[in-house]
Structures are given as C-alpha cells and as structure tokens.
Image (cartoon, rainbow, N blue to C red):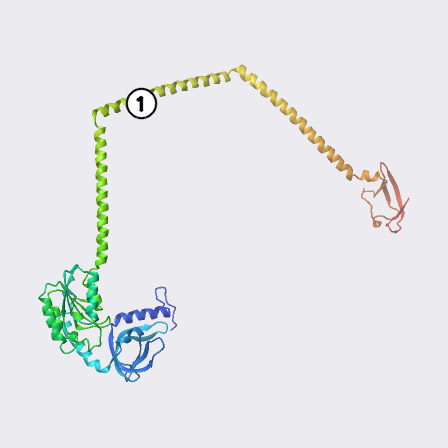
Amino acid sequence: MPVSAPGPEARVYQPAELNQEVRLHLEAGFPRLWLAGEISNLARPGSGHLYFSLKDARAQIRCALFRGQLGNVEGRPENGDQVLVRGRLSLYEPRGDYQLIADAILPAGSGALQQAFDALKKKLESEGLFDAALKRALPAYPAVIAVVTSATGAAVRDILSTLRRRWPTARVELHPAQVQGAEAVPALLHALDRAARSDAEVLILARGGGSIEDLWAFNDEALARRIAAMPMPVVSGVGHETDFTIADFVADLRAATPTAAAEAVTPDGPALRRRIKELHARLQRSHARLLEQAWQRLDQAQRRLAAQHPKRRLDDGNSRLQTLQRRLERAARMRLDALTEQGRTMALRIAACNPARRISDSGKRLDQARRRLERAVMLELQRHAQRLAVGARALDAVSPLAVLGRGYALVEDQHGRLLARAGDFRPGQTTWTRVRDFRVVSKVVKVEPGDDNSCSTL
C-alpha cells in the first residue's frame, strides 16, 4: 500500500531534536550506576580526558571520563584491565552516540564492597530508614553545633572555619573520632553517643574524600542505625560530591562536602547582619514617617480648631458679606453698561432703517455701479481694439496680396485651384493669372521644360 504523508497532528522530528529528547529520557531514566567490564580502545588525548570502551563477551559501550574526575581513578587504567566504572548514561547529540559519562574507575576487586553496599542499602531502605517522612528539619539559628570527624586533616579545618565565618555566635562541640580503618566504626559510635548526651541542636558527621575502602566505615549497619536514633538532626558531609555512603542516605540531610555540611547547618551570618541593618534602617524610616504624619495630623487639627472659633466665624461672615456686596455693585454697573450699549445699538439700527437714508444710499450705490460699468466698457473696447490691430498686422504680413504687390503673380485654373507645377498645365488650357488688383485670362500654347519648369502662355 502507498505511504501517505504525515498529517498536521503528526510530530516530525529533526535529527537534533530527536537526539536531544533521547538524551533527556536516557539521563532521566537511568540514575548514576556501576558498570563492570574490560577496558579497550583506551585513548589519552592532550586534553587530559580518558576515552575508552567497556566490554564483555557479547557487547561494549563507549565511555568518557573527563579530566576533572581523574582524582576518582585508582591506578593507571590500561587496555585489558577488568574494572568497575561509575557514571551516568548520556547521548552525544552531534553523532547520536550512546555513551557512559564516567566519574570513577576502580579495579574489579572492589566489586565485593559494592555488592555489600548495595545489599545493605536495599535492606535499610526496605525497613524505611531512608524514608523522607523521617527527615527532620534543621534549626534555623542553632546555638550549639556538634561535629563528629577526625581531629586532624582538612575536613575539620574547613568545617570550623566555615562555622566561624558564617555563624560565630554558635558554640561548636568537636567530638573527634577515627574515620578510617578497623577502629573507625567503634570510634564513630562512641563519638555519636557523647554528642547525643550534649545539648547540641544539630550534628555534622564528616570526613574528607577517598576510595570506597577509605569511606567504608560510613557504610556500617550499626552506624546507620545509630545515626537514625540521634536526638538531633544529622547532616552528613562524607567524601566528595560524587561519593555516596549509607550514612548519607540515613542522615536527615546529605551535603556534598564537609564545607557544604557546615554551610547547611548555619545561616549566612554576614548576610543576616546586612538584613538586620536593612530592617533597622527601614524601621527608622517608618518611625520617622509615622512621626511626621502625626505632626501633620496635629497641625490639621489645630487649623480646624481655629477655624471653628466664634470670632473667626464672625470675621469670615463679615468678609463674605463684603465680597457679596462688591460683587452686587459690579454686577449692577455691568448691567447698566450693557443696557446703555444696547440703547446705542438700537438707535443706530433705527437710523439705518429710515427710508430717506436708504434711498440716498441706494442712489450712491447706483452711481458707483454706473461709473464702474462705464470704466469696464471702455477698458474692454480698448482691449479689443488692440487685439484687432495686432491681428490686422499679422494678417497683412501673411496676405498673398502683399506678395502680389511686390511683382509676383498667382496662376489659377477655372476652379480657382493654384497651378504651381509643370504637370498642372496642358496645351490649350485656359488659366487666370492674378497680379495685384487685376487678373489676366490666358491660354496655354505649350509647356517647355526649363531650369525653373516654366511654361508659355498667350
């Protein structure tokens, strides 16, 4: 059957549009995932990025790891290595290539830890420890902040400096604990117990970044259950932005870094101080405006009170009476002037209607009309006389009689037609020659050609 063109309701894609929609669906449908396989086609261009394929016995997928994520790569990957790659699926729109944007590469030996992580996560999630309804809100302005982390290292320095900068009024209680190794879990549990007995309003659980083995203490089940049982909200700031632990999922809030955790539990003190100054200035302006409005109302009340005084009312009445008297006198004068002017106008109109006056005026107008007519007739006669003289001179200038007066003659036939060429004459023909003031009747004897095509006549 023939295929018809798509109707107006059908969506017709351009390649770029389709690739964009596929990429959006692909990225939204697949969260960050782990992929196991063998590295092949590894390339290290000058940009510092890594491009490779990850394959198994039946298929392969293109992968890209950008230079900024090289800190999450253990060792130096080579072709043939069995690895675990973490990343997210995407689509390179210009070519329509489906690929994995990697953010970490681990040797395949780390797979057991990942499986243990996934199993514990699934177990605790089924028990509801990750339920969003259990998450507690952080205090807006905490007075006491507990910090559980290593007493040494960059993480504790970043947290303390951020807390001092943003919210110096809070008291910070540091509960140091080992955050890596076999003794890390008991140390963390002991530190959490101490913090639970304090009067802290919020707690930060943090450590710096590292490999999955370095962060493994924060994937412990006992630690996760202890975090869920803490009497105050817990903010986790473990590792880097791309690192996830069980502690992150069970905490009331997960921060990308230790510094971000310190920012999450405190308001922005400098911004808050600026806001307080702004509100104080607005309060002062409002107070000044209200005071000014009160003084204006007082002035208005005093003016109204003065306006109601008996003497003021008598003075106002007297002033209005004098004003009305002046208006009455002015109106009477204006009325009298109007009547006087009206009388003069009527007298002029009566005088203009007098018959003798109208007859005299008509006679004057008749004389004026007669004089104008006479002047017009004379001017018209002069104009026609001039035109006649000019025409006569022009007619005389072109008149044949004037030519005849200079000795020329005109030869005509019996019908009065002018004979001017040799072919117009025939022997025996009668012609009439007009000279000036007479005509000569002739007969053609013969026609003789000559330089001037002349003929002989009698």
Label 1 crowd (10 A; few <14 / some 14-19 / many >=20): few
Quarter of the image for the C terminus: give it.
top right
Q: Quadrant of residue 61?
A: bottom left
Quarter of the image for the N terminus: give it.
bottom left
Residue annotated with mark 1: 323
Disc 1 element: helix
Q: Observer-nearest residue: 369 or 73? A: 73
Q: Position of residue 366 (x, y in %)?
A: 60, 20
Q: Is residue 220 left or right of residue 274?
A: left
Q: Is residue 66 visible?
A: no
Q: Observer-nearest residue: 13 or 180? A: 180
Q: Position of residue 90 (x, y in %)?
A: 30, 73
In the image, what residue type sits under mark 1?
A: Thr
Q: Position of residue 155 (x, y in %)?
A: 20, 70
Q: Residue at x 58, y 21 (%)?
A: 365
Work out which residue is located at the far top of the displayed protein and give it: 356
Q: Quadrant of residue 370?
A: top right
Q: Is residue 146 left or right of residue 271?
A: left
Work out which residue is located at the far left of the displayed protein and give it: 197
The vertical placement of 60 against 330, above or below, is: below
Q: Observer-nearest residue: 24 or 246? A: 246
Q: Is residue 35 visible?
A: yes
The vertical placement of 447 against 238, above or below, is: above
Q: Observer-nearest residue: 245 or 155? A: 155
Q: How many tags in the picture? A: 1
Q: Position of residue 449 (x, y in %)?
A: 88, 51
Q: Quadrant of residue 410?
A: top right
Q: Residue at x 58, y 19 (%)?
A: 364
The vertical placement of 92 against 141, above or below, is: below
